[in-house]
Image (spheres, rainbow, N blue to C red):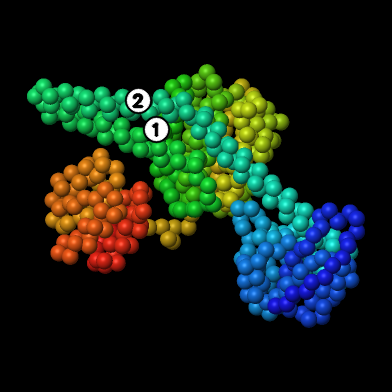
């Protein structure tokens, strides 16, 4: 690895892009090509620091350790190839590497060029075409393309965040109504039970009914919060093999409560649906997004129908959906009885920033995000709509390979048991601490409680005290969170079991 420093003046049309000192990495194992490349830069007198790596391992190390204004990457290297290096430094969220990249090769190859561009390169040069001018232009163009794409990524991220916030705003009215109903059920039934206790008029059947109503309402509230958290997640796809039918059944009650009374939700799940390998939270987000759009198209009320089916695509199929390879797919159809759309709107419906809503009432990113998620999951999405007759979206997702599918455990097969062990319970929220202690003591466990990390460590250091398990909250105020508490406890008593 070597560095060269020199200075030069670019043609006037490029000076604005390349002013000031630049640091460039050349990844090239051929001494002659390296010499020619360096000479061209020296002849131009560019104000530049040129670093050199002769193999992929050194190149990746240098890219990770240094900031470069541009990277020239040879395709053929002794230990790897240029596209493999690009894949290693490629960020799929930005579709870029850590710096502008120009691929170098001795022979032109359309596949190499395509692969290089797909994994974050900005340009492609044949070695026998390299001159002082082509290098200058390549650097300026690569920087311009890189900065432009990075800027568009930042804008898109901001707008995606704005779209999520807008989605929460759209759902606020329905959510507030649903949550007030939940609180009414909980507070009303707990007041009934309290009145019976005070009046010494306990009726077991009435108490049991009220208690069950409270539990159902609390579960509804927990499910509501779970769904809302979808909109705050900023992450790449985390696919899992799931049953979409179960996911839709779980979403039905949430959608019914949040979309409002004038909207009727119908979910028709066919039996024996194929599993799919997708990110479940993003699938939920997509369905909610499309249902919100459907609701907006029915301001005076209407019906939303969600249906599923197994679809096999083969060459002899008479009406083969566009954009799908042969194979097995799970189809999800979401249709409404709303205003519908004309052909001109349907053609643009998945375009980023396109919206039919009034100014300030939509970013135009909702359906483009759904489209991106479906395509990234290996599927496709189609839309059919007519003005005055409603709209139908059909999502096609590839059938999952079931080799790694684990058998789930039915909740009714789980038996709740108790014990006599000693548990150190750490929780800063006193009401949760009391509740958890009471539940565990009912099962026969001996509970020692602590409301802070320091108190937990004070307890655990008592020499004659035996603790079978540490049961701790993770988010704790003060100097130690639950993870740090567990580390201290295990250092003192390594035999202790830990449950977060």
Look at the numbered disc 2 and give the secondary structure of its residue: helix
Residue 359 location in percent, x, y?
66, 26
The Cα–Cα distance between marks 2 and 1, rounded to whole angstroms, is: 14 Å
Left/right of residue 61 with respect to residue 494 in the rendered view: right
Q: Is residue 12 above or below residue 309?
A: below
> Which numbered disc covers residue 181?
2
Relative height, residue 156 to residue 11 (above, below): above
Q: Is residue 495 left or right of residue 74?
A: left
In the displayed image of the protein, which residue is found farthest to the right? 11
Give how far across and how far down residue 361 sits, in percent: 61, 28
Measuring from the top left, give residue 194's x and y in whole percent: 17, 26
Q: Position of residue 186 (x, y in %)?
A: 28, 28
Q: Could you tell me which residue is drawn at 42 percent across and 47 percent down?
A: 243
**Above or below for 67 versus 229:** below
* Quadrant of the frame with the N terminus: bottom right
- The residue carrying mark 1 is 253
- Closest to the observer, 384 or 494: 494
Residue 496 got which mark? none
Among the 4 quarters of the image, the one containing residue 430:
top left
Could you tell which of marks 2 and 1 lies nearer the N-terminus?
Answer: 2
Which one is nearer the viewer's eye here, 463 or 34?
A: 463
Q: Is residue 116 visible?
A: no
The quadrant in which residue 62 appears is bottom right
Q: Quadrant of residue 318?
A: top right
User: In this view, which residue lies farthest toward the left?
Assistant: 200
């Amino acid at each position: 690895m070597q560095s060269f420093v020199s200075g030069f003046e670019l043609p006037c049309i490029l000076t604005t892009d390349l002013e000031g000192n630049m640091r460039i990495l050349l990844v090239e194992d051929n001494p002659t090509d390296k010499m020619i490349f360096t000479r061209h830069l020296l002849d131009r007198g560019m104000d530049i620091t040129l670093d050199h790596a002769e193999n992929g391992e050194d190149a990746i190390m240098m890219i990770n350790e240094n900031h470069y204004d541009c990277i020239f990457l040879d395709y053929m290297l002794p230990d790897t190839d240029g596209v493999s290096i690009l894949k290693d430094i490629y960020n799929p969220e930005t579709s870029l590497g850590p710096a502008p990249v120009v691929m170098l090769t001795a022979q032109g190859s359309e596949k190499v060029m395509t692969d290089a561009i797909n994994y974050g390169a900005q340009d492609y040069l044949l070695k026998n075409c390299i001159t002082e001018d082509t290098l200058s232009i390549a650097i300026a163009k690569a920087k311009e393309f890189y900065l432009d794409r990075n800027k568009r990524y930042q804008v898109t991220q901001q707008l995606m965040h704005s779209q999520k916030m807008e989605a929460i705003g759209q759902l606020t009215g329905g959510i507030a109504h649903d949550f007030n109903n939940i609180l009414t059920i909980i507070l009303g039934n707990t007041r009934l039970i309290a009145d019976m206790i005070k009046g010494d008029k306990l009726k077991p059947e009435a108490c049991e009914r009220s208690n069950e109503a409270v539990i159902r309402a609390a579960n509804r509230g927990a499910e509501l919060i779970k769904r809302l958290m979808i909109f705050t997640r900023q992450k790449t796809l985390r696919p899992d093999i799931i049953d979409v039918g179960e996911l839709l059944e779980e979403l039905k009650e949430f959608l019914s409560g949040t979309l409002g009374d004038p909207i009727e939700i119908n979910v028709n799940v066919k039996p024996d649906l194929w599993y799919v390998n997708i990110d479940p939270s993003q699938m939920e987000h997509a369905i909610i997004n499309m249902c919100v759009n459907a609701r907006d198209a029915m301001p005076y009320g209407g019906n939303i129908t969600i249906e599923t089916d197994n679809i096999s695509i083969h060459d002899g199929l008479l009406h083969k959906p566009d954009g799908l390879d042969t194979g097995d797919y799970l189809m999800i159809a979401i249709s409404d009885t709303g205003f519908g759309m004309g052909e001109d709107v349907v053609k643009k419906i998945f375009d980023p920033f396109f919206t039919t809503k009034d100014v300030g009432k939509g970013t135009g990113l909702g359906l483009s995000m759904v489209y991106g998620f479906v395509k990234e999951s290996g599927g496709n999405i189609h839309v059919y709509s007519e003005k005055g007759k409603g709209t139908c979206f059909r999502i096609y997702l590839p059938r999952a390979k079931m080799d790694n599918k684990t058998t789930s455990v039915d909740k009714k097969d789980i038996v709740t048991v108790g014990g006599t062990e000693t548990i150190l319970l750490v929780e800063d929220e006193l009401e949760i601490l009391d509740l958890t202690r009471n539940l565990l003591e009912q099962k026969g466990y001996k509970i020692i409680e602590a409301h802070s990390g320091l108190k937990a460590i004070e307890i655990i250091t008592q020499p004659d005290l035996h603790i079978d398990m540490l049961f701790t909250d993770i988010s704790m105020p003060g100097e130690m969170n639950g993870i740090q508490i567990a580390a201290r406890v295990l250092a003192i008593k390594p035999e202790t079991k830990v449950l977060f």
